[in-house]
Image (cartoon, grey):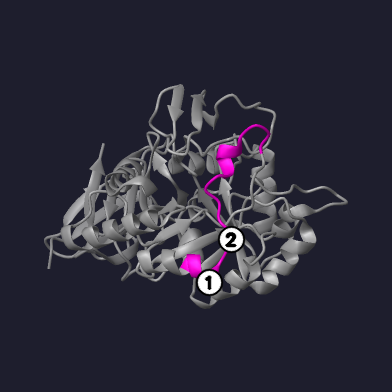
């Protein structure tokens, strides 16, 4: 048995609640005990670390994340690993690399296997998320390159991706208005893949029909979908008003206004919202950055946008620069929600949506030791993945 480690803190968030004067004990990559310091004995010989008033929580889980420093996971194994290592510095311990190609899902699988064999240096990879190529076109004026890699949704094409991933794809986004979308939705649903509405100008009625075929998730709620109007509820209205749908939410206050964040929380609750980043350009200074598909992304004042686009035009943001800890901070400090509720959106809720909650997402006995220690400003002081410290400030 590896050395037992006991982390003490005045504030331990287990994924559902805050334990005051709490303790987390782990060994051999697994959590051995969680509870009050008064009632939880520390094994003899354990390394005891008193974290004081710093918060201990489950590691964050990002189910929609493309890359960092302008280098996207789907283009190489090296960049997939770079992303895994980068986000660990900000308290994220599991990610679904978000890609749109067979190579992309293959790199995610390869890193997953490498981590199992060689150990962890960053966030764990439990699978991948495909945002594309089965999306509806954005049809941005003068920007045909944005849609050039889209493909019609077909079972045959999906099977190519599924084979390349060795059956590890967790979620696939789909434009519900595309011919063949519902047939593919049913096929993927039966394989256990979560099917998500994304990038569609469809309305409320078609979204309700899509739910009947197996769409149970909404990619980056509000963004690149029809909005809520009192006579035209749109996809947004269908998602906000139906408990069948789980939703992603980018909590940077840029993609989604704080008031809209609050509306989502009040409509969906913390259990049906997954805090995501849509990260692609984090870690870069302001400037222009070309992408492989011919587009140029401009980073300015923390916003990534298609170069030359009108900021007032919808659908021109190109991923984000936010790291997940900033979203937790915004929900807690800006919106005023309880610490454990803010963490829930980024830990156990996405874990349940992706069906990985049996081993991660909360501090519970028998689960993987995916743990983070935070200061009061939500900076990660120590990030632990499967019992291995992969980052320490």
Query: What is the quadrant of the N terminus in the image?
Result: bottom left
Would residue 262 appear left or right of 93 to someone viewing this image? right
Q: Residue furthest bottom?
A: 190
- Residue 192, percent from left and from top: 49, 74
Q: Is residue 99 magenta?
A: no
Image quadrant in which you'd find residue 32: bottom left
| Residue bounds of the magenta highlight | 140-158
- Residue 2 visible within the image: yes
User: Around disc 1, counting alpha carbons within 10 Å, would you say few (fewer than 14), some (14 to 19), or many (20 or more)?
Assistant: many
Height in image: 368 above or below 254?
below
Q: Is residue 148 magenta?
A: yes
Q: Give the distance between the C-alpha atoms of the residues marked 1 and 2, in whole angstroms.
A: 11 Å
Query: What is the quadrant of the C terminus in the image?
Result: top left
User: Around disc 2, counting alpha carbons within 10 Å, would you say few (fewer than 14), some (14 to 19), or many (20 or more)?
Assistant: many
Mark 1 or mark 2: which comes first in sequence?
1
Q: State yes or no: discs 1 and 2 in contact (Cβ < 8 Å).
A: no
Please tell me whether mark 2 sits on a helix, a strand or a loop. strand
Name the residue that disc number 1 marks. Answer: 188
- Residue 302 visible within the image: no
Would residue 267 appear left or right of 14 to someone viewing this image? right
Image quadrant in which you'd find residue 4: bottom left
Total numbered labels: 2
* Residue 196, disc: 2
Would residue 282 appear left or right of 327 to someone viewing this image? left
Image quadrant in which you'd find residue 31: bottom left
Residue plotted at (45% across, 22% down): 286
- Residue 294, percent from left and from top: 48, 34
- Along the line of sight, the residue nearer the viewer: 19 or 277: 277
- Residue 186, percent from left and from top: 59, 74
């Amino acid at each position: 048995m590896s050395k037992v480690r006991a982390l003490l803190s005045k504030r331990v968030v287990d994924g559902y609640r805050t334990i005051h004067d709490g303790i987390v004990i782990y060994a051999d990559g697994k959590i051995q005990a969680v509870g009050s310091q008064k009632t939880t004995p520390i094994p003899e010989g354990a390394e005891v670390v008193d974290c004081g008033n710093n918060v201990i929580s489950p590691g964050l889980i990002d189910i929609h994340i493309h890359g960092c420093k302008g280098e996207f996971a789907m283009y190489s194994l090296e960049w997939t690993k770079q992303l895994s290592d980068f986000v660990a510095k900000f308290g994220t311990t599991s990610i679904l690399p978000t890609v749109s190609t067979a190579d992309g899902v293959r790199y995610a699988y390869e890193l997953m296997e490498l981590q199992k064999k060689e150990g962890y240096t960053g966030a764990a990879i439990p699978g991948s998320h495909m945002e594309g190529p089965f999306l509806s076109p954005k049809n941005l004026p003068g920007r045909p390159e944005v849609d050039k890699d889209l493909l019609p949704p077909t079972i045959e094409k999906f099977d190519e991706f599924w084979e390349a991933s060795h059956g590890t794809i967790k979620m696939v986004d789909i434009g519900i208005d595309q011919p063949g979308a519902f047939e593919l939705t049913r096929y993927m649903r039966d394989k256990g893949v979560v099917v998500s509405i994304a990038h569609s100008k469809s309305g409320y009625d078609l979204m309700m029909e899509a739910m009947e075929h197996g769409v149970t998730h909404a990619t980056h709620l509000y963004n690149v979908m029809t909005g809520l109007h009192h006579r035209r509820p749109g996809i947004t209205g269908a998602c906000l008003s139906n408990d069948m749908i789980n939703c992603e939410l980018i909590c940077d206050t840029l993609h989604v206004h704080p008031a809209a964040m609050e509306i989502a929380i009040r409509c969906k609750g913390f259990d049906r919202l997954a805090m995501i980043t849509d990260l692609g350009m984090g870690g870069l200074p302001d400037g222009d950055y070309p992408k492989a598909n011919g587009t140029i992304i401009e980073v300015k004042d923390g916003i990534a946008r298609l170069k030359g686009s009108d900021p007032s035009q919808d659908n021109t943001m190109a991923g984000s620069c936010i790291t997940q800890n900033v979203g937790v901070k915004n929900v807690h400090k800006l919106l005023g929600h309880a610490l454990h509720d803010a963490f829930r959106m980024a830990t156990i809720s996405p874990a349940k949506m992706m069906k990985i909650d049996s081993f991660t997402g909360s501090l519970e006995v028998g689960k993987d030791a995916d743990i983070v220690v935070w200061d009061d400003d939500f900076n990660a002081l120590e990030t632990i993945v499967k019992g291995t410290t992969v980052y320490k400030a």
